[in-house]
Image: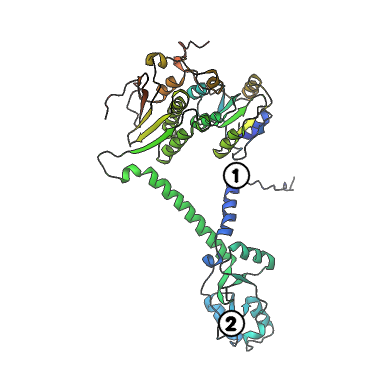
Amino acid sequence: MDTSTPPKTRIVTDQEAEDISRVEELAYELKINEVMTATPITLAPELRMREVLEIFRKKRISGAPVITGDGNLVGILSMEDLIRCLIDTDLDASISKYMTTKLITVANTDPIIEALKKFVGTNFGRLLVVDKNQKLAGIITKGDINRGILKALEHDYQTEEIKKYRASHLFEDIESDRTSLILRYKIKQGDFNRGGQASSNIKRALIRLGASKQIARRCGIAIYEAEMNLIIHTTEGGVLRVEIESNQITIDAYDYGPGIKDVQLALKPGYSTASEAIREMGFGAGMGLANISRCVDQMKIESVLGKGTRLKMRLFLENDHPNNALTIDSEE
Amino acid sequence: MNINELINIVEGTPLTKSFDGSEEILGGCGADLMSDVLASIEPGAVLLTGLCNPQVIRTALMADVAAVVLVRGKNPPESTIKLAEEESIPLITSPFGMFELCGRLHLAGLPSLEKQVGDQQDCDCS
């Protein structure tokens, strides 16, 4: 029987990599005074070791800084020092005989990465934290750092959840007879490089507001085609106006020229007036309006040659509406 | 098939870094006309295309495309790569042509995600 274990190769997933980097960020963002114990138990140098034993036992601690009556930090006493004293059966000695006077300190305003470096470098269990006057400000252990990071991660998570919650409950939280959110985007004629930016922003907003993936996709495709039409076919660009309500989304794409000569012809799949340059960019095949009508529940196009065009589209958010494209019943 | 397996099959070079290679691809679609893509592609597909401008990435975003493969070793403009990176859309360039790529992916078991659309009969573009 083969008892050898295969060599373990640790594969870091993307999710883990993401978490690691946030923890690493926190190591630089969090300050030592945000995670340290600010009022640690301190010892006076003239205390007997016997009393220290009692303090450690009662307070369930394994080390403490030693401070003189006038507040000067003179040493640190750890469990190891106490064990040395017990081996010597010297419990009547004063702290100053056994304490460690070589002090490893960190500044209270430093990021916790400084403390982590010192933990790695010294193998100590706790570090003394001092203020800018070298007075004791607290102590920090690896446990303090873990707790601090966990708390910060939890806070990040809650903030994100609250943001999402607020956005998706917008319509329930506000009382009115009819609540709507209106997004407006100015679209510049000929601005191919930014073509689709408004559509991307609208799609993102819909997802954030709690729309289903299908609705966001249908809306995104319809608005993208309308946005490209404004970029390709208008004389001076136009406006995209999206009105979001809890039961429907109404999209208006309007411009000030040149207007469409024959609307029925323009609606015909394959009919296009686009130039060869536009076609080379993957558009202008006369599919835009047909695509739009497939994605929306209602659609209406009005155009006056020489004046401009208005394309109105509507999507219902409940499923009980049949797709009756090309009509928008009531004007409000 | 996931993105990493796709890159192997098309012998491609990823042009962006901000994507998860273990993401599953549900099928494929090949087209150079973005309106055709918007009309027919189903969510979760890899898009094979010869078009390199940023509109390819915009189209991918709108239509929930899982990855974009540029055919015949095309190198897209910087603006396309930048947008793909920002939006975490995997952008891959492959040395092979459209037909070869469709064949390779189909052979590897990737189904077509180009749905039929009904209103093409009277399309008078030749």
Assign the N terminus of chain B to one quadrant of the image: top right
Tell me which residue sits at (58%, 34%) in the image. B79
Tell me if mark 1 has few (under 14), some (14-19) or many (20+) residues whose alpha carbon lies within 10 angstroms of its own. few
Q: CA distance from mark 2 to mark 1?
A: 49 Å
User: Callout 2: residue from which chain?
Assistant: A
Coloring basis for residues: rainbow
Determine whether A166 is above or below B1 in the image: below
Q: Which residue is mark 2?
A: A72
Q: Which element carries disc 2, helix, strand or loop?
A: loop
Q: Which residue is mark 1?
A: A14
Tell me which residue sits at (62%, 64%) in the image. A114
Nearer to the camera, A143 or A161: A161
Nearer to the camera, A320 or A245: A245
Nearer to the camera, A98 or A19: A19
Left or right for B5, reference A301: right
User: Callout 1: residue from which chain?
Assistant: A
Where on the picture, by quarter, is residue A26?
Answer: bottom right
Q: Position of residue A144 (x, y in %)?
A: 55, 65
Under mark 2, the amino acid is: Asn
Q: Which element carries disc 1, helix, strand or loop?
A: helix
Under mark 1, the amino acid is: Asp
Residues tagged by mark 2 and mark 1 found on one chain of the structure: yes
Disc tally is: 2
The mark found on residue B20 in the picture is none
Where on the picture, by quarter, is residue B104?
Answer: top right
Ranked by sequence position, the earlier of labels 2 and 1 is 1
Nearer to the camera, A115 or A224: A224
Which one is closest to the eye, mark 2 or mark 1? 2
Q: Position of residue A286 (x, y in %)?
A: 47, 17
Q: Label 1 near label 2: C-beta < 8 Å? A: no
